[in-house]
Image (cartoon, helix red, strand yellow):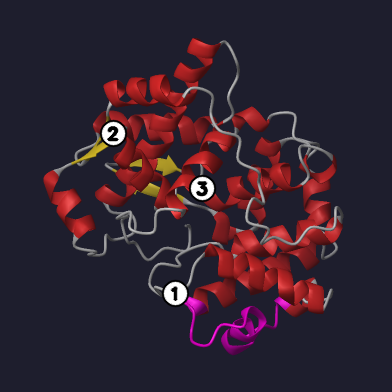
Amino acid sequence: MDDVRATSAWVATHSSHVVVDSAGIEKVVDSIGPIPKVEWDFEGIHYFDNGPLTVQYLFVLDALNFCFWPDKELNYNHLASGLKAALQNDQSAFDADRLQKYTGPQLRELLKWPRPLPLEDERVRLLHEVGCELERSFDGKASNLVKSCGKSGLKLVALVTRHFPGFRDHSLYKGHQVFLYKRAQIFVADLWGAFKGQAYGQFNDIGSITIMADYIVPAVLRQLGVLRYSSTLASTIEANSEIGPGSEEEVELRACSVHAVEKMRELISMKSGKQVLSVELDLWLWASGVQCSSLPHHRTLSIYY
């Protein structure tokens, strides 16, 4: 994840629309005290059986975990709980051969969703990609993918992005490649959280994972005074206007969020003398954001978040 940290820092240094406010970081760190511990499944919406089927569920979940905002009634909870119910009803629902055959209407039926999903064709394409490559390289099982990483979250992110193109979350920004890898990293974080750092969730380098740059975390960081936007960008977001994928504004929103939270983590560790994980900060920030439905966030049609 050195690439994610380094390229996000480069964006923050050269940003035109988003500023990481050092004074704001200091103020937040001083005011919050110990980071509140947020349980991974604090809402009780995820499937968990302490075995390989949970790994399969999480990989399918994270393949589809993007772009809910175009449908005002749809959110992550619908996806997580819908897939959970589907698996409880039919434990073969996410077998690799079946993943390769789902259609848009069948995915909607699986989730019990009454109308077309945002970017539905892309969601179906990514399901097919996951099923095909799991069958080709991992005997159909995401648990074999996880076993092959040797308890390294970094290696798992590398394996996922190597084998599954739909997880290759990077952009070109002012002539530089920027790596963010939100959904590949959240697969590691979900495994770690679900299995409480044991079994399939044991990663000896979990501290290497950064936050997962989406559209909730930047909004929370702005509310906290950690990020500041240009007047033009602020107006675009407040008007609910779309921001193009790969645009300067979109890359800056995400990369500056990564860099800001890394700076927060470093400062917390320095002041408290205790190591803090970026994945813990991410879960705290995200949980804070989803509980504030009126929080204005940027809107980008993207398969990456």
Tell me, for residue 73, which label it has, or none: 1
Tell me, for residue 287, which label it has, or none: 3
Q: Inspect the image, locate mark 1, and give the three-letter code of the amino acid beneath it.
A: Glu
Whether residue 265 appears in magenta in the rendering, the answer is no
Q: Are marks 2 and 1 in contact (CB under 8 Å)?
A: no
Above or below, comparing residue 4 to residue 115 in the picture:
above
Q: Could you tell me which residue is drawn at 73 percent across and 35 percent down?
A: 152
Q: Which residue is nearer to you in this view: 101 or 53?
A: 53
Q: Is 248 left, or right, of 5 in this rendering?
A: left
Q: What residue is pinned by disc 2?
A: 225
Location of residue 112 (image quadrant): bottom right
Secondary structure of the residue carrying tag 1 is loop
What percent of the width, then of the height, locates residue 70? 38, 72
Circle 1 packing at 10 Å, graded few (<14), some (14-19), many (20+), is: few
Whether residue 104 appears in magenta in the rendering, the answer is yes
Q: Is 242 left, or right, of 158 in this rendering?
A: left
What percent of the width, then of the height, locates residue 38? 60, 40
Location of residue 10 (image quadrant): top left
Q: Inspect the image, locate mark 3, and give the three-letter code of the amino acid beneath it.
A: Ala
What percent of the width, then of the height, locates residue 206? 67, 32
Above or below, comparing residue 295 to residue 20 in the picture:
below
Above or below, comparing residue 250 to residue 192 in the picture:
below
* Image quadrant containing the N terminus: top right
- For the record, the magenta segment spans 99-120
